[in-house]
Image (tube, helix red, strand yellow):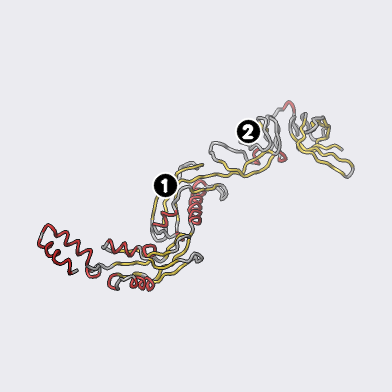
Amino acid sequence: MIFFLPKIIRLVNDRASVTGWLLFIVWFIPAGAMGQIADIKLKPFVTMDQKKRVVRLQEIAEISTSNFRQGQTLSALDIDEFPIDQQSLEVSAEQIRFRLLLAGWKDTEFRLLGERTLLERVSAGDLKQQIEQGIRQDILQTYQLHQDAVDIRLLSSIETTLQRLDFDFSTLSSSVSLPTQLPLGRRHLRVAFQDGGGKHYQTSLSVEITRYEEVVRLTSNVPAGTTLDESLLQRVRRPVNSNEVQFASFESVIGKEVQRDMKQFDLLQASAVKTPRSNPSRGHYDVRKNDLISLIARRGTLSVKLRGVRSNQNGRIGELIELIHPESKKLIYATLVDGQTAVID
């Protein structure tokens, strides 16, 4: 300090070097001597990434000081170590004070506000699921869908940003701006985040939205004109990625005719079936030609049931009708006992 005094005096005498003199004061006179006291306000609750171990002061406290260098030094100060196998850690104000004194700070250079900070570990995967669940609930409520109707996959990386902004994940909530029609596939949605502490953040997130429906699948090959019954149908849950395709419900296709040849495992769209045309001149028939019914062959106490047998004619209950065996294609004659079953005794 004595070495620089002659130069300092010369600088002061030179009006053009007043700036240099002021810079010297800022850099070489201690912050406490200038009345610059750093306020360190402890956060009551903080979440940390699962992989981080070192706890720094900037992560558990809000630091306010007019001295830039002082603020940088305080922010980077390591306070404690968070063990990997530990899910929570409490840091007290007294522990922070002791660490500051150990680093060479004086009691007159800082002011601690708050008693303690509680840290809890949260993995990026847990946070991602929390965000996906929030978006999903907004979609279900907006479009009045049942709980299993939609699946959400977050494609953007927002977890690090929310952690850097010190959001309290235990009270984190989100709201999504949604269009009139349910968006499907990969879309960008405007999402607003907030926590119990009043923090707010808005951003655009890339998500993939998949809608699921209970649809109807055929259990066997079906030619055009076949009247559908429960033996030909199966309920399945499938992803639907377009609002343009309308699938038929199980109940709505019973008794309807398929309009084209269809294969086993085909999914029934609403446009694939039609209501059979009534023909008063032909009277009422319980079974029509090309309907698939079940055939029961009885002999004594034994009986064998064969499904998918095609009717080769129109018929009424109690009548003997002509059927076609599904494998041999031979003609079989059996008595129709209901709209879905014929019997050979």
Q: Nearer the viewer, residue 48 or 288?
A: 48
Q: Residue furthest right?
A: 300
Instruction: From the image, tell me which residue sits under label 1.
Output: 204
SS type, badge 2: helix
Disc on the earlier residue, 1 or 2: 1
Name the quarter where the N terminus is drawn.
bottom left
Expressed as whole percent of the image width and height from the top left, the position of residue 334 reads: 83, 34
Mark 1: which amino acid? Ser
Residue at horizontal 55%, vertical 44%? 211
Residue 51 falls left or right of residue 332? left
Q: Nearer the viewer, residue 106 or 228?
A: 106
Q: Which mark is residue 108?
A: none
Expressed as whole percent of the image width and height from the top left, the position of residue 188 reads: 45, 44
The answer to whether 58 is drawn above or below residue 279 in the figure is below
From where the camera sits, is residue 323 visible? no
SS type, badge 1: strand
Instruction: From the image, tell me which residue sits under label 2.
Output: 272
Residue at horizontal 71%, vertical 40%? 230
